[in-house]
Image (spheres, coloured by chain):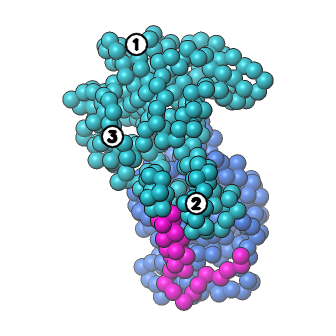
Amino acid sequence: MNTEPDETVAGPGGDRERLEDIEASLLLEGIHRHYGFDFRQYARASIRRRLWRRTYAEGLDSFTGLLERVLHDPEVMERLLRDLSINVTSMFRDPAFFAALRTRVVPLLRTYPFLRIWNAGCSTGEETYALAILLREVGLLERSRIYATDINEQVLATAAQGVYPLAKMREYTENYLAAGGSRAFSDYYTARFDAVRFDPSLRDTVIFAQHNLVSDRSFNEFHLIVCRNVMIYFDRQLQNRVHHLFLDSLVPYGVLGLGLKESLRHTAVSQRYEDLDEERRLYRKRP
Amino acid sequence: MTAGVRRAAGAPGGSRAHRPVRLVVIGGSWGGLDAACELLDELPAPLPVPVLLVLHRARTSDAEVLRAAVRRCSGQTLVEVEDQRGLAPGAVHLAPPDYHVLVEDGALSLSLDAPVEYSRPSIDVAFGSAADSFGAGTAAVLLSGAGRDGARGLAQVGQAGGWTLVQAPASAQRQEMPAAGLASWSPDVVAAPQELGRRLASLIGAEASPDERPT
């Protein structure tokens, strides 16, 4: 692998990068045409890393090689889909967000007799259970319906189990307390060997369903949409499309919550919201 | 994929004097903030090219404290990276804690992929994506720190034809990271932070006068 940069053309890195870019585009196009998953407008740099990881994991050394396998072996596609849709997160990640939900958003939610909440891109469900716990503690869970959606059915099945590693509970407990949790976090799960199962009754008001933010349309009107650290993997154009989807899916004065380093500022919909808590990324739809 | 790529000793860097630096990526860990401040002090303000600064930070690190510290010692404008932030000159873009920062064509994107070399943000990730997007227009600077984050990315920048600068281990509060960089790639410059800054300043200035070689 001892290569010298090619001095004879204007951009040595540029030439190699262009070929890889072509191969990436062909791979994503092939996936779209054969399986219907559209990753073509995902942010290129981050998806490229994940594609390389899968490429090496399959013992291959090019995206073209991966394309061949993916097209002819659905199990490879399944593995790739996991790579592309699992976003490892923790419960009550960025506790300040959940604290702000509690203090700024809950009072608004109380005014509705029935609540619909959309947790978009819920992945393995940590965020969903955190929302359910918070709603229970403020007495709103009974009147809520939480729609937890993700592109990947298998990941949703995992989320529905509510089972997580025991080793994570210390971090989750710290987060929970910093978020303003009022009970002992261990009240919400039972431990068995090296895993915990969260209280199944938390799941009573949750509907886990497959939904593809890229291709699917709005399916309801919500009072609160929480979509955190999902759209960071989308390019700007796709982000704007999804933002329009969210806008269409919110009731007037509905609230949108984003991830710590995501903002509406550079989006096409920034004027359609007012800041509820810009620093914590909570926005309210203007009527 | 091995990181043990060395450029042949004596390989000419002079032919790249005409390739202007379009993006600077600086990576550091323990001792990296001090080194970065010393380096940034030598750069013109406002910065004529975008600068991305990746410092290993604890998840709970107070952003304001860090911002104030760097502003105090560098006189440069500092902005913390948000998703899709444009890569504009004039400011030092600081990677946020607990996200990877990736360089796209005109913007910075974020990722929550697993830590690399136990680090998130990872310098390898930043260097590597800069090499992919900016190729030979990248200048990568590897500073003090423990661990090996950045060594592989440094080689990627070098292989793409970009400029590579490493803090002289003897001048570093923690030698491990710059030493790992040197073991992975033979950089264009090895020096203490102040000298690194001066060399970088002339490289940045090289855009205005492409016939001048940095001395």
Q: Earlier in the sequence, mark 1 or mark 3?
A: 1
Q: Main secondary structure of the magenta part?
A: helix
Q: Residue at x 44, y 11 (%)?
A: A142
Using the image, name the chain to which the residue with label 2 belongs: A
Q: As drawn, is A101 to the left or to the right of B54?
A: left
What's the mark number on residue A72?
Answer: 2
Lateral position of residue A89 relative to residue B144, left or right? left
As drawn, the chain in blue is B
Q: Earlier in the sequence, mark 3 or mark 2?
A: 2
SS at circle 2: helix
Residue corresponding to mark 3: A217
Q: CA distance from mark 1 to mark 2?
A: 47 Å
User: Where residue A76 sits in the image (x, y, percent)?
Assistant: 61, 54
Q: Which residues are magenta?
A: A1-28
Could you say which quadrant of the image residue A71 lies in?
bottom right
Amino acid at dot 3: Arg
Chain that is coloured cyan in the picture: A
Please state the horizontal and vertical placement of residue B13, each as a whole percent of the image. Answer: 62, 84
Nearer the observer, A57 or B110: A57
| Res. A112 visible in picture | yes
Q: Give the Cα distance between marks 1 and 3.
A: 25 Å
Q: Where does the image place residue B124, in percent across and percent down from the top left?
A: 64, 59
The amino acid on which the numbered mark 1 sits, given as a three-letter code, is Arg
Q: Dot 2: few (<14), some (14–19), or many (≥20) neighbours within 10 Å? A: few
Q: Is residue B167 visible?
A: no
- Residue with the mark numbered 1: A143
Considering the numbered disc 3 on the image, is that residue within a helix, a strand or a loop?
Answer: loop
**Chain under callout 3:** A
Observer-nearest of A118 and B45: A118
Chain identity of mark 1: A
Front residue of A225/A152: it is A152
